Amino acid sequence: MARVNNWQLGREMSYWYPESRPQRQFAAVFDTNKCIACQTCTLACKTTWTSGRGQEYMLWNNVESKPYGFYPLAWDLKLLEMLNGGAWTNNRYDGQTIFESAPAGERVLGWRPEQQDYAYPNVGEDDCTGQVDKGAGMMALPHMNWFFYLARICNHCTYPACLASCPRGSIYKRPEDGIVLVDQGRCRGYQECVKGCPYKKVFFNPMTGTSEKCIACYPKMEQGIQPQCFVNCIGKIRLAGYISKPGQERQENPIDYLVRIRKIALPLFPQFGLEPNVYYIPPIHVPLSFSRQLFGPGADDAVKAYRNAANDPDLSSLLCLFGSSEQVMTKWSRQGDTVSGLDDKGTTLVRVPRNEPVFTRPAYDKLYQITRTNCP
Ligand code: SF4
Ligand code: SF4
């Protein structure tokens, strides 16, 4: 085991391979407050990448209702139980990661889901049971007091457990963009990666006998276009880009700004130790103890900052860029009440107003001699 720096844990940790950060790292920010669980992202991915034989059950992108939704079943609960918790002292994690608590002779603490665990994504997650008395409202339903939608893809981790646990070295992290891929020619289907990935984002294809996973739509990213689940997102909750190496963050990089500078977007289960690169703006209406378990100790400040976003021109402007262009915006800038998304060369890709103008049309349109029914 090597000693590597994990900035999300605030300390060094043990990992199977030495630290080797890519030239730039694919990363994303998801705003959980805007997700409506329409599953358009799920279908956009499914129809693009996993509509073949043996892929029927695969959801490289899935959206689950937390706290009771899972795909596969209990993916997070099971590992949290095995890991047996661990405390944070301020921003330093004092517990053990899944690498540090690996059983003797294994590289990662993991478990492999049963086939049944994949069988019923989303069934019953949002349903209440039985009759709701008139006027009882949401508060009468214990499991509906609060919930939120958690959209998940592969995190293209800095320290991937899938890669560490593969005995054939079939999984690799691209040096140019940090995207994690399975070499289909080398894979022999041992499924150690399925067992090792705590997020359960590698899937075994019984027809090909190999493991498959989210590829961050790398053919699109190479063209400067965001992945399918991003550009099709109805709620405009997603922003794809690249995160800078620790200590090299730049204000003009939208991902750096949200993750490292404003610290409003947080990793999912940082305590697992993988340094995942999909970052979440936590839901503002959820008990903070739950958010802290999911997103680490930064949840309190992130929620506070998001609640205050309306009084924060930079933050609210940048949030308006989400879903505004299909191209990858590696830079951003604000000019008064307008925010721009730019590419690597500094070319403006899109301009968005911070406050959308409101136009009130007369109910009767003299020009066309029609009465509109959708006017106030
Ligand atoms: S498309 Fe966007 S809003 Fe719809 S479920 Fe997916 S992440 Fe949520
Ligand atoms: S989320 Fe899982 S599959 Fe993706 S890179 Fe991390 S360990 Fe590998």
Image: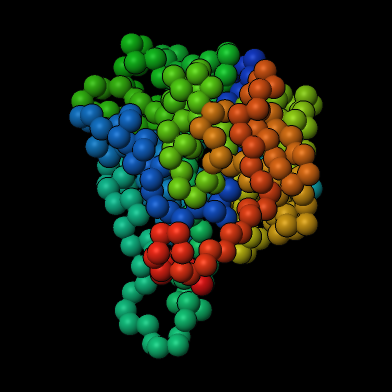
Image quadrant in which you'd find residue 368: bottom left
Image quadrant in which you'd find residue 201: top left
Instruction: Please say if 182 is above or below 226.
Output: above
- Residue 125, percent from left and from top: 38, 61
Identity of the residue drawn at 51% across and 79% down = 139
Identity of the residue drawn at 29% across and 52% down = 120
- Residue 285, percent from left and from top: 61, 64
- Residue 322, percent from left and from top: 58, 42
Instruction: Please say if 109 is above or below 40.
Output: above
Is 7 on the left or on the right of 117, as rendered? right
Identity of the residue drawn at 69% across and 29% down = 331
Name, please, the residue furthest toward the top. Answer: 185
Residue 83, can we see it?
Answer: no
Is 92 on the left or on the right of 211, as rendered? right
- Residue 211, percent from left and from top: 34, 25
Is 315 on the left or on the right of 62, as rendered? right
